[in-house]
Amino acid sequence: MRFRTLFTIVMSAAAMAAFAVEMPFIAGEKFPDTDGRHINAHGGGIMTKDGTYYWYGEHRGDGTPGSGQKGVALYTSDNLRDWTNRGIVLAMSDTEGDILEKGGIIERPKVLYCPNTGKYVMWFHHELKGRGYGAAHSAVAIADSPYGPFRLIESSRVNPGIMPENLDTEARNKTWAKDLEWWTPQWREAVGEGLFTIRDLEGGQMARDQGVFVDDDGKAYHIYSSEENLTLQIAELDPTYTRHTGRYVRLFPGGHNEAPAMFKHDGTYWLITSGCTGWDPNEARLMKAKNIFGPWEQLPNPCRGEKAEKTYLGQSTFVMNNDGRYTFMADVWNPKCLADSRHLWLPIEFEADGTPYINSPYNK
Ligand code: GAL
């Protein structure tokens, strides 16, 4: 009897070790933290370290419409279901003129642990106070602990003075007709040939919606909507994960992709994005590549079933790799009260040929 009990305990411990913690299925309902308050971490992502899950996201005010953003929020969990509020780990400043002054915008923060430096590195989209979405900065902050505080080291445009690897240097000397009307065939051609890349060459590329990705070899990459949100760019980060190396490519020029979430499965890079309709949901897109620098191929919407054409009312933010099982994480934005925006966590499944897809939460 005793032996059997011991055997059962040993077997259950082995089973627990073999299987990762289950990711919960979240379908846009309120998601309370351990204090019972809806989780105020949006456009975020999860970093896993030593058995703890760290969920970083946009803090969007105290829940009263119009209340301001304080910075980046952190929630932690050891089972992916019960999340404890750890407060603001990157704080916006009350000091006038500070680059992180409140009234600016912080979006889509993602944190990586850098094994080469032992630091935690946060990348985010940063807009400066009083300039709407005009600055289009990418920002990076570091901390010694995953609980912060994170310290800003840079907020700027990306790779100033450097040409993307997949744009001919002849583009530098190209002249396009002035005041090309958007969405005309001539304008599309010009965008493809680097109209905005060259316009912004000196000061650096625009960077709004963004994410980061660490490859199997430990190299990290920054993926962001650039060139007036028309073209995605993928830029390599240096071994500290805090700087761009200068190596970058453009993806789907004029494709209008936002909300990039990258993952790798069986040697293929997958990228889920959204179209560009502000807080309103639209149809998700799926792209794949064998090499992170391309060529990239676009596939049909990975969402299936009811409301698939609106990504189940959500917009991608992150794909969580939980020991080889993947979860699509998205935000159901509520622009009237962003703090009350909801979360979608849906399992990613794979076709026999390896193509990922997501089933509708509304069909269950
Ligand atoms: C969305 C974007 C969000 C936020 C919003 C503002 O398209 O994905 O992160 O920037 O626009 O309207």
Image (cartoon, rainbow, N blue to C red):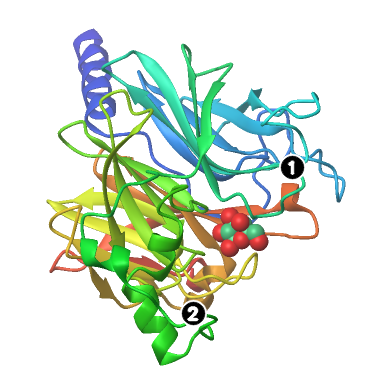
Q: Residue 110 in the image: x percent, y percent?
A: 47, 37
> Front-most of 123 and 157?
157
Residue 14 appearing in the image: yes
For the point 40% across and 68% down, the residue is 359
Query: Which mark is nearer the camera, 1 or 2?
Result: 1
Local packing at callout 1 (Cα closer than 10 Å; few below 14, some 14-19, many 20+) is: some
Q: Where's ligand 1: which quadrant?
A: bottom right
Spot occupied by residue 247 in the image (x, y as percentages of width and height): 24, 44
Question: Relative to residue 281, is residue 247 drawn left or right?
Answer: left
Q: Earlier in the sequence, mark 1 or mark 2?
A: 1
Going by the numbered disc 2, the residue's amino acid type is Glu
Query: Most extreme residue toward the bottom, as rendered?
Result: 185
Instruction: Give me the residue at 68% from left, 53% from top.
Output: 341
Query: Under tag 2, what secondary structure?
Result: helix
Q: Are marks 1 and 2 in contact (CB under 8 Å)?
A: no
- Can you say which quadrant of the picture contains the N terminus? top left
Q: Residues within 10 Å of mark 2 (few under 14, many from 20)?
A: some
Closer to the camera in the image, 237 or 168: 168
Which residue shows up at 45% across the image and 69% down it?
230
Locate residue 170: give its quadrant. bottom left
Residue 29, quarter of picture: bottom right
Residue 215, position in %: x, y? 21, 39
User: For the residue marked with disc 1, what is the amino acid?
Assistant: Lys
User: Horizontal placement of 306 versus 351: left or right?
Assistant: right
Q: Is residue 287 left or right of residue 41?
A: left
Query: Is residue 79 among what the camera can see?
Result: no
Mark 1 — residue? Answer: 129
The residue that disc 2 covers is: 309
Q: Could you tell me how far apart the alpha carbons at marks 1 and 2 are, in whole angstroms?
A: 35 Å
Judged left or right of residue 159, residue 143 is: right
